[in-house]
Image (spheres, rainbow, N blue to C red):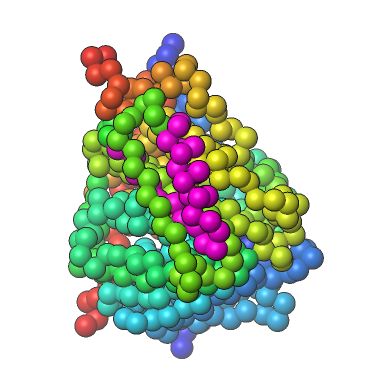
Amino acid sequence: MGKISYMRLKGSQNLRLRLLLSTLSTTPILIEDIRADATWPGLRPHEVSLLRLLEKISDDCVVEINETGTKLKYKPGIVIGGRHLVHDCGTSRAIGYFLEPLIVLGLFGKKALSIRLKGITNDSKDPSVDTFRSTTLPMLKQFGIPPEGLDLKIQSCGVPPHGGGEVILSIPIVQDSLKAITWIDEGMVKRIRGVTFSTKVSVQFENTMIHAARGIFNRLLPDVHIFTDHKAGEQAGKSPGYGISLFAETTSGCFISADTAVSYGREDDEGELDDEKKELSPPGDIGEKIASALLGEIEQGGVVDSTHQGLLFLLCALCPQDVSKVRVGKLSPYGIEVLRHIRDFLGVKFVIKPDPSTETVILKCVGCGLKNLSRKDN
Amino acid sequence: LSERTALRHNINLMQLVYGKPASKSSNEMKDTSEEESEDDEFFKPKGEGNKKSKEGVNDNDVDIDDCSKFLSNGSIKDWKSEDLIASIRDRFVTGDWSK
């Protein structure tokens, strides 16, 4: 066995992105100084869980972590995929954290992926599973991914701190490669849809959220429908909470989303202890806040919302060697990180041009031409 | 003039994301761009200092949470005001199409 040359990285930031791009570009990485100076040094439980998940879906992948967890060696394997996999995502981050890399990896697997993920379905940090269903999955279709076999089933809801939610994700593989896109027409908003959920609290919380959200939209658009999804019994997970996920569909088929959830904080999260230990925000405020956030995203005028910028850029970079052109609103900090990492791992650099007339940003790139090589091994 | 500002803005965005043109993505250039570059922090053998100078929101927090969700806390506008509603009315099918 030859000596493996590792790409050397430092720090804990963007671990998810690094692992994902490392796997896609088959670049082994060595990360040092992972929270070396922190009170609790090393990898967090959700990061370890993500590594375990990568091991689960790929073959010949090697993960080495030193004793304190401050140093990580990762040699990517071939993404295999497969059916009836199960993974416990733990309760330190929501399932959304795992879904984001997983949907991209699943596309470039050997076999279609279907996996049951357990943990927290909705929280305030990661996109909720409802948003994944409504916004993220339709986005993949723009890149020529067949809608058959692309699905996210929500079995039960779970909010922090104890989770208890469960979803089943199915991702088809791309037959050869993605399809380069020109996607600059954001269109006009024709309808707003959404869903609220509540676990172990009164269903009245949902009605209040919907009422407040509708109040914001009423003067703009009549076509607003927000559904309730009250979970009871087994389906309600282990902790009380409620939340809302909204999306706007435009005439050109773009989806703009905003979501959040409220629940009692995780005990181990020192940072958030102060805000979340007190009473939960009233549902009326939440409904209004998310409706406002959605209008804020619509105002930006991109083809995706700021949460999905990273995924959009990544998919563009993975396209065949054709020009992709997309329009987004203000670049989000995470989007910028994704752009930097794409350049480092895939060597794809975007041409970024502001469009002053609409205050949006146009990004163009030539994809790296990633082919689904694992599939060809069959 | 507007063209010029547009051009300048254009470069700024590229720089904001990818760093100064001189530092590009090549690893050899890392010594010259030590102080100001906001990219390449991953390749540096002793990269502690430069992370601080990284532009953008994640300033000097190398251990920031890995979130794609953009939480614009505080910047949420009051969407009940008539002016704001008028400003995005044309983003909806119910808006004025004649413009």
| Residue at 65% over, 70% down | A43
Image spot of residue B74 (x, y percent): 62, 35
- Which of A146/A129 is in front? A129
Furthest residue to the bottom? A1
Image spot of residue A270 (x, y percent): 75, 59
| Residue at 50% over, 25% down | B80
| Residue at 79% over, 65% down | A39
Q: Is residue A204 magenta?
A: yes
Residue A105 to residue A326: above or below: below
Q: Which residues are magenta?
A: A191-216
Residue A101 to residue A74: above or below: above
| Residue at 24% over, 68% down | A149
Q: Is residue B19 magenta?
A: no
Image spot of residue A339 (x, y percent): 46, 48
Number of on-image labels:
0
Residue A7 to residue A214: above or below: below
- Which of B13/B79 is in front? B79
Residue B21 to residue A6: above or below: above
Q: State which quadrant residue A365 falls in.
A: top left
Q: Is residue A43 visible?
A: yes
Q: Quadrant of the C terminus of chain A?
A: bottom left
Image spot of residue A49 (x, y percent): 55, 75
Q: Is residue A17 visible?
A: no
- Which of B3/A242 is in front? A242
